Amino acid sequence: MGKTSRDKRDIYYRLAKENKWRARSAFKLMQIDDEFQILKGVRRAVDLCAAPGSWSQVLSKRIYEEDNESKIVAIDLQPMSPIPGVIQLQGDITSMDTANKVIEHFSGEKADIVICDGAPDVTGIHSLDEYMQAELILAAFNITSHVLRTGGNFLAKIFRSRNSSLLYAQMKKFFKDVYLAKPRSSRQSSCEAFVLCLNYQPPEGFVPSMTCMSLEEVSTDPEKVTPNNITGFITCGDLSGWDSEKSYTLDLDISFPGGSNPEDGKRYEFKEVVQPPTEPAYKDALEMKKNGIFWKMAADLNKETQAEIRREK
Ligand code: SAM
């Protein structure tokens, strides 16, 4: 694959680089916000699983640039390069210590909104990946139940599966309105969507805990899984705008609003990604490549694997 092939195949990847967003996901949050105005008037926001930081960039632009007194806390296992107005916490969202640190940064107050675009490391085993993603959302909800104020909102990425209606049912116990949002920038062919929970109203006597929900607990509550519990599915973004499934010609001047500007005739220009990962998982492999030992190690490993296969036969 050449340097430009992804640019041609993925218009939102290219638009992200043009507009200095760290990842194409920035468009997903902006399209959801354009539809639901969830960032309007927010003074305290939490971005869970934030690295490399495109959602935090959107929060910085739409909240911090509007009101310099507002506070944004971004959490991730990975380190992240600085963003104006964003306090960064390197930590695990499943830990109580992280929840306490968030509240500390808000001087004892709670957040108006919590957003989570988290994804666990993919194993390639579909059912396991789906399960891990669902567990991560529940972990996101658990920390949210500690840091979100009553009346606040929660947005989280999900991968739709046969278990999704159980999750919406559980969310409906805690929020007044629950929607499923599918932004235009999220590929139609992908089962990715965003559960948007509005107006946090925990049930009376509810005591937040870091283990208060699990998939098992959700699935043993058939009472809540009724056909009446249908969750609204909302597509967000201009339907006549950029299509995340389509390939666009590299001649197209995307810096011009609406796409091509025939008078300008500006040619395609390759741009580097805005913010490469600070601590990528493949860092050791790159180092080995630079030192010329990568291919030797890969060949040795291959020999070992082949020998093992022969032994097993
Ligand atoms: N929203 C980000 C953006 O716009 O740039 C992209 C998020 S990326 C798809 C998913 C992130 O989830 C990864 O950076 C990963 O480190 C983080 N993550 C996964 N499990 C986590 C956990 N338990 N605690 C904190 N972060 C986690």
Image: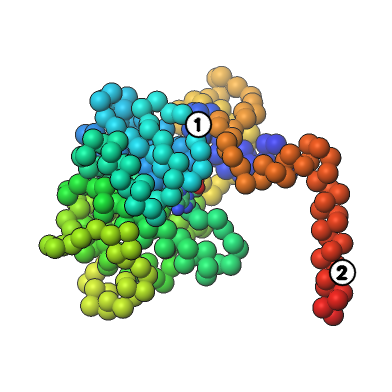
Q: Nearer the viewer, residue 254 or 205?
A: 205
Quarter holding the N terminus is top right
Q: Residue furthest top?
A: 264
User: Residue 121, percent across and down?
Assistant: 55, 55
- Mark 2 touches mark 1? (CB < 8 Å): no
Give the distance between the C-alpha atoms of the residues marked 2 and 1, in whole angstroms: 44 Å
User: Residue 176, percent across and down?
Assistant: 18, 57
Residue appearing at x 55%, y 24% in the figure = 262
The colour scheme applied to this rendered structure is rainbow
Local SS, label 1: loop
Residue appearing at x 28%, y 60% in the figure = 209
- Which of the numbered marks, if any, corresponds to residue 81? 1
Q: Residue furthest front?
A: 97
Chain-order first, disc 2 or disc 1: 1
- Which of the numbered marks, if any, corresponds to residue 135? none
Q: Is residue 170 left or right of residue 158?
A: left
Q: Nearer the viewer, residue 28 or 111?
A: 111
User: Pointer 2: what residue?
Assistant: 307
Residue appearing at x 38%, y 33% in the figure = 87
Q: Amino acid at mark 1?
A: Ser
Q: Amino acid at mark 2?
A: Ala
Q: Nearer the viewer, residue 38 or 280?
A: 280
Tell me, yes or no, if residue 39 can be seen here.
no
User: Residue 184, percent across and down?
Assistant: 43, 47
Q: Is mark 1 within 8 Å of ligand 1?
A: no
